[in-house]
Structure formats: C-alpha cells, structure tokens
Amino acid sequence: MKIISHIKVNGIDLFYEKRGAGKPLYILHDGPGFDHRYFNNSLAELEDIRELYYIDFRGHGKSSKAGKKSYNIYTFTSDIEALRRELGHSSIDILGHSMGGFVGILFAIMHTGHLDSLILVSVPPEHGGIKGNYSLKARQLLLKSRHFFKKKRKIGKKDIDRDVLVRDILLMSWKNYVPERLHSQYSDYIRSLQNLEIFFDMQKELTDFTAVDKLEYIKQPTLVIFGEDDNFIKRGRKLKDIKNCRFSVIPSVKHLPFLEDKEYFNMVVREFLTGKML
C-alpha cells in the first residue's frame, strides 16, 4: 500500500510517500535538485521488514520552496527531526544516498536518541564541491556561465536559463553516475526535474560541508555501501572511522547501486537491518 502526503514542519510543507509495513525507515535523496522518485521501486524488497518513508527535502520535488538561506544540510536535518516528531515515531532508521547521507550523518550526531541505525549509500564524508565530479565539457560550461548564476541575464539577444543550464550539466555528466544501460532512464529522470536553480544555490554549502571530524560521535550501527566504480569511494573510505561500521562494496557499479544491482543491494541492507544472513 502506498500513501502520499504533505505535512507541515518548520513552516513548510514537507512531502513524503509511505510504503510497506514495520519500523520506519526514512529514505533521503541525493541533490541538490533531485527528489525521491529516482529510487523508483528499487527498494521494494525491503517493504516487508520496514515502513519506508520517501521524503523530498524542502525546495525539492513536491515539498515547499523556502528562503535560499534555509537550503542547507542543518535545516534539512531539522526538518527530518520535525517530521519524526509529527509522525509520532519514537525512533527511526535512516537510509541516505549521497547528499541525503550528509543529513543522515548530522541526524545521527544531533538526534542520537531517536536513531537506531544508519545506512549511508555513496556518501563521502566531505563533498569537495562540483570540481572533478562532472565531465570536462560540463565543467567548462559551468565555468563560462559562472557570472550569470545569481540571476537570469541576457548575453546579446540570448538568455541564460538556469534550469536549462543545470539540466545540461547533469545530462552531460551521466557517465560519472550510471552505466550506459541506465543512460536512458537517468536522462528521462533528469529531464523531468523542475526548479533546478537550487543546484546553484547549494554549491557553496556542499563545497564547505565536512563531517570528517564528527564521525567519532556516531554511535549507531552504520552500514556504508559504495559501488566499486563510484568516483567518491576513495574519500568514502574515511567513514570506516565510525566505530560500529560495516563497509560494503558492490562490484562493478557506480553511484546508484540500488538501481544498478538491486538484488545485491537489497540483500546487504536486509542482512544489516534484520541481522539474518540470506
């Protein structure tokens, strides 16, 4: 059964989609600019052991827009805690993918008593900014357009549309994130996104974010999952500093292991959540 809802938290309407039954597992998406939809049905095999809550962060997907200064990892974390209280969950599990994992890390530190376990998927403990994570062509486009980012401006008779620019950058960088067989699916998803200006609004936030010096404060059992071919895996190995950490590498996949090898991914997560080998 699928339930779709909005709930008022911290002055905004936060969207979530609920599936499955059992203890709540909050699913936190990547970004900036993405939403929960790219998970598709990849986590359906977990619905018999957990009640899955797919959440759109503020300014993303079907959640409310807000002031640009509120688009940061700390506010997102506060929204998730407010959502937990509104839904009446005494404690939760979190599965955070990439940027969503940043929120998961902060939640584990700031709201320790309300988090039972943490699953970090393709999450480096520090982002390092956009440089180096996109194709050369996309980076050149970004650099050439940098001084137009604050607002839409005219160059001669041409307009720079920030949504179009972000979409082009993401479409040109697909090889860094998914294999060729998922190119069409990835591209269709990127083309469906709206309000992509938040991509630029949050670049400094992501560049500056680091949790390296905070990992020792995470006490919950933590599962870290990376694809073997993910560009972030080298930096992600720092997560082994978490005391109660299990580090799992899925062979021959990139940044979206739940789409590239759904069976392997769900097997690892089920074993972690249930403590039972399959």
Image (cartoon, rainbow, N blue to C red):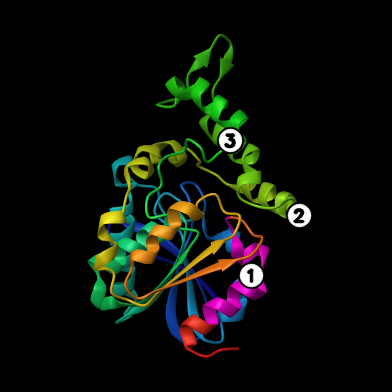
Task: Tell us which disc is closer to us: 2 or 3.
Answer: 2
Whether residue 176 sits left or right of residue 91 in the image: it is: right
At x 38%, y 44%, the residue is 206
Q: Position of residue 255 (x, y in %)?
A: 57, 55
At x 61%, y 34%, the residue is 168
- Relative depth, front residue between 99 and 153: 99
Q: Which of marks 2 and 3 is nearer the N terminus?
A: 3
Q: Where is residue 179 in the image (x, y as percent from the top left)?
A: 70, 52
Question: Is residue 166 within the magenta segment?
Answer: no
- Relative depth, front residue between 78 and 263: 263
SS at badge 2: helix
Q: What residue type is labelled 3?
A: Ile
The residue to which callout 2 is attached is 181
The residue to which callout 3 is attached is 169
At x 39%, y 41%, the residue is 202
Chief SS of the magenta region: helix
The residue to which callout 1 is attached is 41
Q: Is residue 55 above or below residue 133?
A: below
SS at badge 3: helix
| C-alpha gap between disc 3 and disc 1 | 26 Å
Q: In which quarter of the image is the N terminus?
A: bottom right
| C-alpha gap between disc 2 and disc 1 | 17 Å
Task: Tell us which disc is closer to us: 2 or 1.
Answer: 2
Task: Tell us which disc is closer to us: 3 or 1.
Answer: 3
Hey, which quadrant is residue 118 in on the image?
A: bottom left
Which residues are drawn in magenta? 255-270
